[in-house]
Image (cartoon, rainbow, N blue to C red):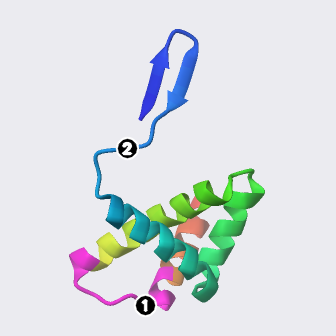
Amino acid sequence: MVFQSGRFSKVHRRYACSKPFRNALYQFAGQSIQKEAWAAAYYRRKRETGKSHSMALRALANQWVRIIHALWLKHEPYDPAVFLAAQQAHAQRAA
């Protein structure tokens, strides 16, 4: 959420959320860097663009939320091969 007043602009963190769930996602994203190659690559890309460690982990956690939500809707377990195939197909369309 962006707060603006005149020439002043600042981004505010969302306060109305489940803090333990937000912390769990943050911790999960940090641990996923060690196990998932795509997550480590995503984290490195964010760090190379000048994001702080916390900002990069929050961005990675957001990616995980999208993946987990899609898996929940489809009632499927996580399969890294399916995710990588979808990621490569998207990269080809974006290029």
Under tag 2, what secondary structure? loop
Regarding residue 13, the answer to whether it shows in the image is: yes
Q: Which mark is residue 14?
A: 2
The C terminus: image quadrant: bottom right
Identify which amino acid the numbered label 2 is placed on: Arg
**Residue 13: percent from the left, percent from the top?**
44, 42
Left/right of residue 49 with respect to residue 11 in the rendered view: right
Q: Residues within 10 Å of mark 1 (few under 14, many from 20)?
A: few
The answer to which of marks 1 and 2 sits earlier in the sequence is 2
Span shown in magenta:
72-83
Identify which amino acid the numbered label 1 is placed on: Asp
Report the front residue among 26 and 95.
Answer: 26
Report the front residue among 30 and 88.
Answer: 30
Q: Residue furthest front?
A: 20
Q: Residue at x 43, y 90 (%)?
A: 79
Residue 84 sits above or below residue 19 on the image: below
Q: Residues within 10 Å of mark 2 (few under 14, many from 20)?
A: few
Under tag 1, what secondary structure? loop
Residue 29 sits above or below residue 62 on the image: below
Q: Is residue 15 magenta?
A: no
Q: Residue at x 28, y 46 (%)?
A: 16
**Residue 88: percent from the left, percent from the top?**
58, 76
Left/right of residue 52 with respect to residue 65 in the rendered view: right
Report the front residue among 50 and 81.
Answer: 50
Residue 12 sits above or below residue 48 on the image: above
The N terminus: image quadrant: top left
Left/right of residue 49 with respect to residue 78 in the rendered view: right
* Quarter of the view holding residue 64: bottom left
**Residue that badge 1 annotates:** 79
Regarding residue 95, the answer to whether it shows in the image is: no
**Residue 7: percent from the left, percent from the top?**
58, 12
**Figure label count:** 2
